[in-house]
């Protein structure tokens, strides 16, 4: 049996990289910050944080970046800070997780039909990635989107996550403006917007637990 040139090309392609290398050199400012954090806290994760959850999930949650005391310390998205307390409690309530969340990566918590990734994989100073860093890291978010065969729903936690998802979905900002509770259609996918579940947003009343739950209640109904 002969193999066509197109088939040979497809078979020789390398699978997309879903997470940067531990010593990813792509963003100099984040590299310097990572090195300083490793020197100060050598027992922390202090590296790009990989996605959490099954690649075959229908729901992908996209956050901003690892928190200093959270995922940058523990190595699992939204694990170890307040944002994770609210996120995982909500996922457990709506059946997107099972087990008990104990704010550590070995707590046995399991996601159900759900995967979590970040727009930026490394912790940035002051939790504020630069536009160039967001653009550079988008390749890994795109790889996750492309390798989730059953993906139907995407939740963007905050405007930066929303904006980072628009490009791979081929949506213009004017077509899909960010707004808490907004839902945008992008071909076979639905993009759901939520304010980020940070302590700042909840302390200032920008986001309440009920507002956050309402987003996942709709997703649960849409995926039923």
Image (cartoon, grey):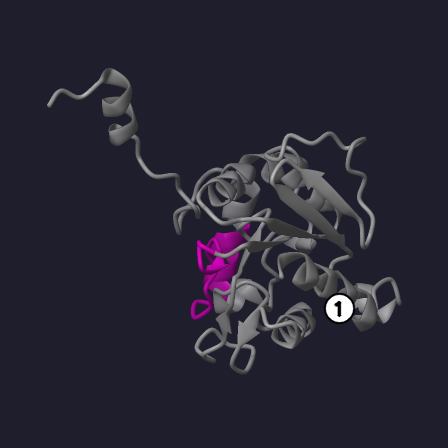
Instruction: Locate residue 146 relative to residue 167 in the image: left or right.
Output: left
Image coordinates of residue 104 in percent, x first then y, are 51, 77
Kindly identify which residue carries mark 1: 213
- Check if residue 173 falls in the magenta segment: no
Question: Which residue is pictured at 25% across the width and 30% down the height?
Answer: 11
Crowd class of label 1 (few under 14; some 14 to 19; many from 20; radius 10 Å):
some
Image coordinates of residue 94 in percent, x first then y, are 65, 72
Q: Is residue 91 visible?
A: yes
Image quarter where the N terminus lies is top left
Q: In the picture shown, does residue 185 fall above or below 2?
A: below
Of the pair 101 and 24, the residue shown nearer to us? 101
Q: In the picture shown, does residue 85 fall above or below 46?
A: below
Q: Residue furthest left?
A: 1
Question: Which residue is pictured at 70% across the width and 44% down the height?
Answer: 162
SS under mark 1: helix
Q: Residue furthest top?
A: 5
Q: In the picture shown, does residue 59 fall above or below 4?
A: below
Question: Which residue is pictured at 52% across the width and 77% down the height?
Answer: 98
Question: Which residue is pictured at 74% across the width and 42% down the height?
Answer: 184
Of the pair 170 and 27, the residue shown nearer to us? 170
Image quarter where the C terminus lies is bottom right
- Check if residue 41 falls in the magenta segment: yes
Q: Give the residues in magenta.
A: 33-56
């Amino acid at each position: 049996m002969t193999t066509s040139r197109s088939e040979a090309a497809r078979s020789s392609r390398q699978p997309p990289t879903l997470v940067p290398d531990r010593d990813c050199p792509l963003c100099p400012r984040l590299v310097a910050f990572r090195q300083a954090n490793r020197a100060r806290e050598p027992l922390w994760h202090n590296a790009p944080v990989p996605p959490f959850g099954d690649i075959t999930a229908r729901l992908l949650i996209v956050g901003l970046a690892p928190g200093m005391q959270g995922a940058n310390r523990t190595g699992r998205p939204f694990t170890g800070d307040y944002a994770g307390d609210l996120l995982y409690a909500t996922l457990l309530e709506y059946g997107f997780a099972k087990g008990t969340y104990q704010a550590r990566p070995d707590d046995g918590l399991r996601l159900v039909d759900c995967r979590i990734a970040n727009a930026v994989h490394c912790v940035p100073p002051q939790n504020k990635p630069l536009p160039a860093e967001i653009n550079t890291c988008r390749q890994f978010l795109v790889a996750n989107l492309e390798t989730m065969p059953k993906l139907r729903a995407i939740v963007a936690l905050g405007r930066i996550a929303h904006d980072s998802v628009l490009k791979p979905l081929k949506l213009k900002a004017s077509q899909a403006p960010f707004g808490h509770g907004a839902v945008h259609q992008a071909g076979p996918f639905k993009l759901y917007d939520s304010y980020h579940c940070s302590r700042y947003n909840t302390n200032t009343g920008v986001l309440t637990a009920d507002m956050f739950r309402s987003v996942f209640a709709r997703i649960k109904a849409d995926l039923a």
